Image (cartoon, rainbow, N blue to C red):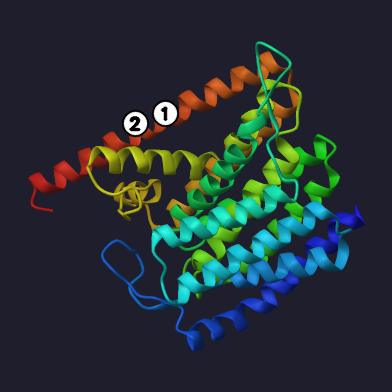
Amino acid sequence: MSQVILPVVIAFLVAFIATPIVIKLARKWGAMDAPCDRKVHTSSMPRMGGLAIYAGFLVAVLATQTINTQLIGVLIGCTMIILLGIADDIKGLSPKVKLAGQTLAALVVVLFGVQISFITNPFADVLFLNALVIPLTVLWIVGVTNAVNLIDGLDGLAAGTSGIAAVIIGIVAFMEGHIAVAILAMVLAGSVFGFLPFNFNPAKVFMGDTGSMFLGFTLSVLAVIGLTKGATVISVFIPIVILGIPIFDTLYAIVRRFLNGVPIFQADKGHLHHQLLDMGLTHKQTVLVIYAINICLGVSAVFMSMLAPPQAVVILIGVAITMLFAMNHLKFVVLSRRQKAKDFGG
């Protein structure tokens, strides 16, 4: 147990101590988030807080973990993402530049052995990806990186969501016997929870793209290492369920923007948290509701990993139907409220 507790405590304390320092650095370097019509905050806020999360994770890993080739690649990739995020938080980068940087960082970890080399197949033992190994692994890493980035719209939302996901990944990886991955996931969670007191509403700092991209990148990599090696078909879906909120919200955003004829990377106010706010929930209530959904998805993923494939598939289908029903109902309620406000001059 000490092999888990010590690194998690180190990560928490380093992130907690580093956050006020990062706030000062953000103000000094001009990494400030100005309010606008698509954002909910009303005053300029320091961002780049993800640097404190990275510091907690890096110090704890270097101080307590055995460094192997694969872990070296993970740390190099994470550092590349952090540098990309800092540049974006200070200067602002175009979506194409950020996508190129994310792809390059993903390629680095792939070259160090972090790969989805096969997927389980319900009609056969396994399906080896061969030539598709690199593109599919890069697609997964870049996709999750951007998914977490896109949900970073409310105080504490992306951080708390990522912290919950990291804990669930740690639990499932431990159950699957991937102890090293479980420890890394718990260390990441410790870093997030050390930062979260400064980021929860009312926030003193935003984690910025520095934090959201780092968390998405690291979660996606840990999922590849620890959750996609199972021999059953359900192992393919466990990381998707754990990261269900950012993944589903991103897919919904892509479809929404495509149907509306706007660029996929153009920000809007149609995300899940915006719709919950439109329903009348407060800032804190919205974040806590999404936390609760994440915990439910995480518990579902844990049960899926424990059950035989037929029972796990039943849970997976139930989760998918529930998510679709909930999103359709939520959209209906929001549209009804907007129509009533329009009818009564609201």
**Which x, y percent locates residue 302?**
70, 33
The percent position of residue 233, horizontal first and vertical second, equals 67, 21
Q: Residue furthest top?
A: 123
Quarter-of-image position of residue 260: top left
Cα distance in 3D space between marks 1 and 2 = 6 Å
Point 59% across, 67% down: residue: 82
Kind of residue sitting beneath label 1: Leu
Task: Judge from the rendering whether residue 112 lies leftward or rightward of residue 249; answer left or right.
Answer: right
Q: Is residue 266 above or below residue 55?
A: above
* Residue 54 seen anywhere in this rendered image of the structure: yes
Residue most extreme to the front: 131
Camera sees residue 200: no
Q: Is residue 22 left or right of residue 263?
A: right
Would you call the spot at circle 2 few (<14 residues within 10 Å), some (14-19), or many (20 or more)? few
Mark 1: few, some, or many residues within 10 Å (few <14, many ≥20)? few
Q: Name above or below for residue 206 compared with residue 288.
A: below
- Identify the residue at horizontal 42%, vertical 68% (top origin): 93
Q: Position of residue 133 (x, y in %)?
A: 65, 36
Q: Which residue is mark 1?
A: 324
User: Residue 21: image x %, image y %?
Assistant: 62, 83
- The residue at which mark 2 appears reads as 328
- Going by the numbered disc 2, the residue's amino acid type is Asn
Where disc 2 sits, the SS reads helix
